[in-house]
Amino acid sequence: MLVLARYGITLHGLAFDTMLGAYLTNPGQRGLGLKDQAFQRLNIVMTPISQLIGTGSKMISMAQVPIHMAADYADYAGADADMTLRLVKPIQNELQRHNLLDLYNSVELPLVPVLLQMEMDGVALDANFLVEFDKKLSEQVKALEKEIYTAVGHQFNINSTKQLGEILFGELKLPSGKKTKTGYSVSADVIEGLRGKHPMVDYLLEYRQLTKLKSTYVDGLLALMDPVTGRVHTSFNQTVASSGRLSSSNPNLQNIPVRTELGRQIRRAFIADPSYVLLTADYSQFELRILAHITHEPRLVEAFSKGEDIHTITASSLFNVPVSEVTKDQRRLAKTVVYAVLYGQSAFGLAQITGMTNSEASEFIKRYHETFPNIKHYVDSTLHQARTQGYVNTLYGRKRFIPDMHSLAFVERQALEREAINMPIQGANADLIKIAMIRIQHALEEKHMKTRMILQVHDELVFEVALEERERARKLIKAMMEGVAKLDVPIEVELKVGKNWYEAEPME
DNA sequence: GCAGTCACG
DNA sequence: ACGTACGTGACTGCG
């Protein structure tokens, strides 16, 4: 559809997509492409495209194909069409057996043209800002390199984990901690523990942050920007994530920095066209609301229904203090505990990321389960389903298959159990936002509005809103996102608006 | 092409 | 004693 669109052809009436169908029957599986499916379902070995156009640096495009090979290409193209058609029935049948036809017909297939439009529209970037930011980062990186070399006494490749490990733990004899398969771990949490032990440590952490920003975000985005339109066009991948989420690539616009102030500056580069503004719409604590709905956990349902701050309530319970006396730190810790327990993290893991002791962590987890007893029941029944039926599913019937865990070692079994616990929640989140996206884009089209939906970041949608449509768009988006389904708890959406993604401020 | 690291929800 | 929260993608080094 994208290729045809480049030549002004709009494909209507998309009837079936074998890749999407195969994805729903087993979203954890690799090999959903035509060649793999033909082999799996029809036992036919198809010619790989690499046999015709080569691989790597020697790869050619269709336009460079020598004419004497035209017949081979005709065969190749014919096989693609033929096998695609032959796959439809078997995949349809399997969707039906798994009760996935509804999800397929009312969510995944209608989402295709929605994503297509988002990819084609793209997002406007402020190239001048990125170039200026790049200069600042380059200068700072250079200065940090110098400081690091001086502190160590000689030059080396700071980006090489091997060289860095040898210097930190060999040459400088700093206390080494974690190991990887190939040597010392030099990840940020390890380096963090070395603060104050050597002057290069602080420089190194800052160097890491700045080079990450420069290479992945500043240089990466500039390289992928269309120089004529000034926009970047991501790909939204619909058959990658085993939970039912989308993913984004080339560039990945679902991991633009937000957590640190410096990183967050990158969001200034994401702008709206003149006479437009950016509007972001975030589902507030969506996964927890879904958990409350699935488990009917009274304390959770009550808190959400009353519009209370869920993390403050949890903190009050965990620390046994009145709601009014919960500190910021307690609230933050409560939030960490909630997500840790929700996804099955161990006391050890919780202790690692929070800095508390193992016994404190296990005490928190215990109190959490006492406060919200239905959550334990959800975990137990989900694991039971995974073991007896071999799959878990979302409210909308999306399935993820969980292999038999019987004979597995403890660690592998635990990992699969956590995947099973997480999927119905993360997957329901994905189902719901997909439905909202379809409805919103249809409404925008129907009303002939200029506003366009341009990004999805798992529980957030970003729009480029025509100035004169601001109020209409706000109401429409809020109503459709919050009304996407009727749950046991209210669904709340927070809207922000601004001339760029960084400056977006609360509406209303 | 793998491993390590780090960015996001 | 071990290894330790789910789901992604991009960049760099290195063999």
Image: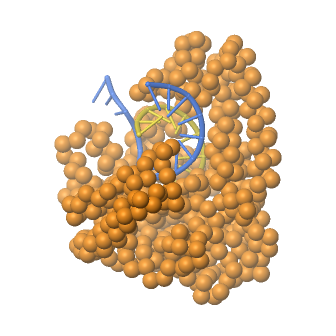
Chain colours: A orange, B yellow, C blue
Quick check: A37 left or right of A286? left
Give whichever of A226, A293 is nearer the camera. Answer: A226
Residue at figure coordinates x 25%, y 57% from the top left: A45
Give whichever of A22, A352 is nearer the camera. Answer: A22
The correct choice, above or below, for A468 with respect to A277 in the image is below
The correct choice, above or below, for A249 with respect to A218 in the image is below
Residue at figure coordinates x 57%, y 32% from the top left: A188
Q: x, y percentage for residue A425?
A: 41, 61
Quick check: A482 left or right of A53? right
The correct choice, above or below, for A324 with respect to A407 in the image is below
The correct choice, above or below, for A13 with respect to A76 in the image is below
Q: Which quadrant of the figure has residue A442?
A: bottom right
Does residue A22 show up? yes
Q: x, y percentage for residue A463?
A: 66, 70
Residue at figure coordinates x 71%, y 67% from the top left: A278
Does residue A374 show up? no
Quick check: A446 left or right of A36? right
Q: x, y percentage for residue A351?
A: 47, 36
Give whichever of A502, A114 is nearer the camera. Answer: A114
